């Protein structure tokens, strides 16, 4: 079974558009590797990206939002290590 990705975002902070944009970026890059991407409303400043229940990135832990390139690399390393990310692989 393919992995499931979840982006939990704070509705109070109005981070839905940021979450939706990242979901689109990840779905575009990993359209064959992911089962689904879910957007999950939360509160209290939460912004977390998880794969099959394990946190891949947490705004609370990092003290910032993830970059698209960074998330693509983290997700690739987790679910498709041999996949090329093209320009997102460059430093």
Image (tube, rainbow, N blue to C red):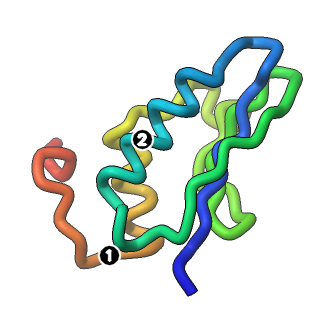
Whole-percent x, y for residue 17 in the image = 55, 21
Measured along the vertical axis of the image, is residue 5 above or below residue 68?
A: below
Badge 2 marks a residue whose secondary structure is helix
Measured along the vertical axis of the image, is residue 7 above or below residue 76?
A: above
Locate residue 87 relative to residue 68 in the image: left or right: left
Residue pictured at 64% horizontal, 24% vertical: 16
For residue 24, the mark is 2
For residue 59, the mark is none
Residue pictured at 72% horizontal, 40% vertical: 8
Residue depth check, mark 1 versus mark 2: number of the one nearer the observer: 2
Whole-percent x, y for residue 1 in the image = 57, 87
Q: Quadrant of residue 39?
A: top right
Badge 1 marks a residue whose secondary structure is loop
Locate residue 90 relative to residue 82 in the image: left or right: left
Toward the viewer: 13 or 60?
A: 13
Whole-percent x, y for residue 31 in the image = 36, 63
Residue pictured at 57% horizontal, 54% vertical: 37
Q: Quadrant of the C terminus?
A: top left
Q: What residue is pinned by disc 1? A: 81
- Gap between marks 1 and 2 measured at Cα: 20 Å
Residue placed farthest to the right in the image? Answer: 44
Name which of mark 1 and mark 2 comes first in the sequence.
Answer: 2
Residue pictured at 61% horizontal, 67% vertical: 4
């Amino acid at each position: 079974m393919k992995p499931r990705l979840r982006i939990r975002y704070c509705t109070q902070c109005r981070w839905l558009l940021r979450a939706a944009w990242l979901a689109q970026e990840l779905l575009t890059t990993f359209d064959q590797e992911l089962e689904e991407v879910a957007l999950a409303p939360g509160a209290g400043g939460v912004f977390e990206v998880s794969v099959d229940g394990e946190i891949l990135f947490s705004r609370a832990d990092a003290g910032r939002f993830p970059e698209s390139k960074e998330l693509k690399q983290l997700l690739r390393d987790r679910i498709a290590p041999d996949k090329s990310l093209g320009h997102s692989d460059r430093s």
